[in-house]
Amino acid sequence: MALLDLAAMEENDEISSTAKSSLSLIASTSPKAVITAFATEVTRYNTIHQTTQITVISPLKSSKTDILRILEQMIENYFTDVIELIIPVCDILLHCLDLQLLKHQNFYDLFPPISKLHMIAYCPATKKLAIGGNNGVIVIHELKNMKSQVC
């Protein structure tokens, strides 16, 4: 997570560039570990956000373009690893994407690489996202209310 903070630094381009390339290299050598670390941070952020009134800045929010770039890289190069952890990947995506844009765009237009993952379905009429995990679990996210249901 420290690399995400460094990647988001705008004051020092050299440090930011080094952190971004380091994140890409780590993602290419151990994509499952990166997905798990990002998903753990999403869970931690959501838990803190629900229980306290203090505004917490998540490293995933401050460097969301880098996270989305890394997820795109992993979908392209490590498809099977992403498929195995598809539910945490979608949790990360929902955390990083600006869902207010769904009023004017389709979900697949917000992050085009997601259309390669056939176990994800989006209904624009109801603004619901369904994700089928490889373990038989189905998660339905209501994007209007930011609620999820496990089936």
Image (tube, rainbow, N blue to C red):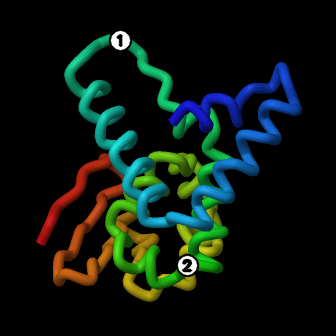
Label 2: few (<14), some or many (≥20) within 10 Å? Answer: some
Residue 101 percent location from the top left of the image:
59, 52
**87 sits to left or right of 3:** left
> How far apart are the two marked residues, 1 and 2, measured between alpha carbons?
37 Å
Can you identify the residue that label 1 sits on?
Answer: 54
Which residue is the extreme one toward the right?
Answer: 13
87 vs 63: above or below: below
Residue 47 percent location from the top left of the image:
24, 32
Task: Give the quadrant of residue 128.
Answer: bottom left
Q: Residue drawn 35% across and 77% down?
A: 84
Residue 23 percent location from the top left of the image:
64, 50
Q: Residue drawn 58% across and 60% down?
A: 27
Of the numbered discs 1 and 2, the one sitting upstream in the chain is 1
Label 1, secondary structure: give it.
Answer: loop
Toward the viewer: 134 or 30? Answer: 30
Disc marking residue 78:
2
52 vs 83: above or below: above
Nearer the observer, disc 1 or disc 2? 2
Toward the viewer: 78 or 53? Answer: 78
147 vs 128: above or below: above
Residue 115 percent location from the top left of the image:
56, 81
Disc marking residue 1:
none
Label 1: few (<14), some or many (≥20) within 10 Å? Answer: few
Toward the viewer: 99 or 65? Answer: 65
Toward the viewer: 121 or 31? Answer: 31
Badge 1 amino acid: Ile
Quarter of the figure with the C terminus? bottom left
Q: Residue drawn 25% across and 67% down?
A: 140
Q: Residue drawn 45% across and 71% down?
A: 124
Label 2, secondary structure: give it.
Answer: loop
**57 sits to left or right of 141:** right
Instruction: Please give the count of numbered marks on the rendered protein.
Output: 2
